[in-house]
Image (tube, helix red, strand yellow):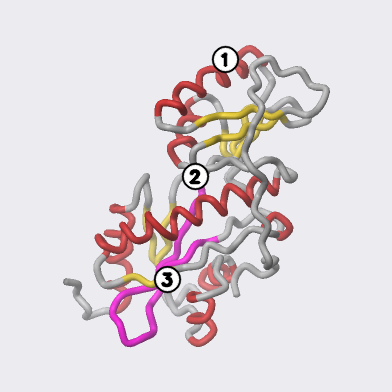
Amino acid sequence: MYDHHDTSDRLASYADVLAGELPGTWTSSYTPAGAKDDLAALADRIWDLDLVATSLADHPLQHAALLARPDGAQLVLLDRHDERDGFIIAAVAPRALPDKAYRAVPEPNGIALVDDPFLSAEHVAGDLLARYDTALAQVRNNALGGLQPSQADRVVLTWQPDGSVATAPVDHRAGEILLAHGFVQDPQDGIYRLNGDDTQAQARALREIGPELEAVGIGTGLQHPAGRSAPTATPASAPPIPAGTRTLSVRGR
């Protein structure tokens, strides 16, 4: 199925096909063995305490393929060091979020893939990617200060002290709708914000996103600090972040 004549070509080619088969828009890039600093930085951000962490403990990162989505989500494809063909894939933690944002958020541990990128894309989308998107939204909400998190079927928007509105949607389709209505995604922490410089434009955007999100099966909630009047608000009813038993202090291993 795949040309095994060169390990680096094989990894890069597999990543290219996988990126094209995942839901949403993904691109892939290859990091060769000579880019030691880039590989070291990437290894530190691998968000895994299970399969991939164990593999890296025995086989330090020699090269990698990075898959990236426009909203900042990243996955890393690595060699699989066992008797089976294929690769392993892991989530990558955002660069700019503080360690405290990861507390009580279960790691979206990586998975093993067979030597078939089309079949593997289904496995990634239904397993790792779903867990990763949920974890990303949780840590981004934690970075906002312990707010109620968005979920796959509900976007929770929260007023900020400066009059802006912020959120961390789980579904990439929700992110696209927010961007189309004036929200700006911070390239560092991945959080979506709508400024309040023009309150009429802000209110119009908040009214318009509701029906568009509803059309793709996503509800909305607008949360605001006590004492603030927000006539367009709908109280959010998302449950709190589930408690975890581990604290992620070093995201690499």
Q: Which residue is mark 1?
A: 204
Whether residues under marks 1 and 3 lie with C-beta atoms below 8 angstroms apart, the answer is no
N-terminal of the pair, mark 1 or mark 3, is: 3
* 117 magenta-colored: no
Whether residues under marks 3 and 2 lie with C-beta atoms below 8 angstroms apart, the answer is no
Q: Is residue 97 visible?
A: yes
Mark 3 or 2: in front is: 2
| Along the line of sight, the residue nearer the viewer: 110 or 214 | 214
Q: Is residue 140 left or right of residue 71?
A: right
Q: Which residue is mark 3?
A: 64
Q: Is residue 177 left or right of residue 115?
A: right
Whether residues under marks 2 and 1 lie with C-beta atoms below 8 angstroms apart, the answer is no
Quarter of the image where the N terminus is located = bottom left
Range drawn in magenta: 71-92
Mark 1 or 3: in front is: 1
Residue 68: image location, x then y, percent:
44, 54
CA separation in Å, label 1 and label 3: 44 Å
Secondary structure of the residue carrying tag 3 is strand
* Three-letter amino acid code of the residue under disc 1: Arg
Q: Which residue is mark 2?
A: 71
Secondary structure of the residue carrying tag 1 is helix
Secondary structure of the residue carrying tag 2 is loop
For the residue carrying disc 3, how many other residues have a C-alpha within 10 Å: few (<14), some (14-19), or many (20+)?
Answer: many
Residue 104: image location, x then y, percent:
68, 59
Residue 154: image location, x then y, percent:
53, 36
For the residue carrying disc 1, how many other residues have a C-alpha within 10 Å: few (<14), some (14-19), or many (20+)?
Answer: few
N-terminal of the pair, mark 3 or mark 2, is: 3
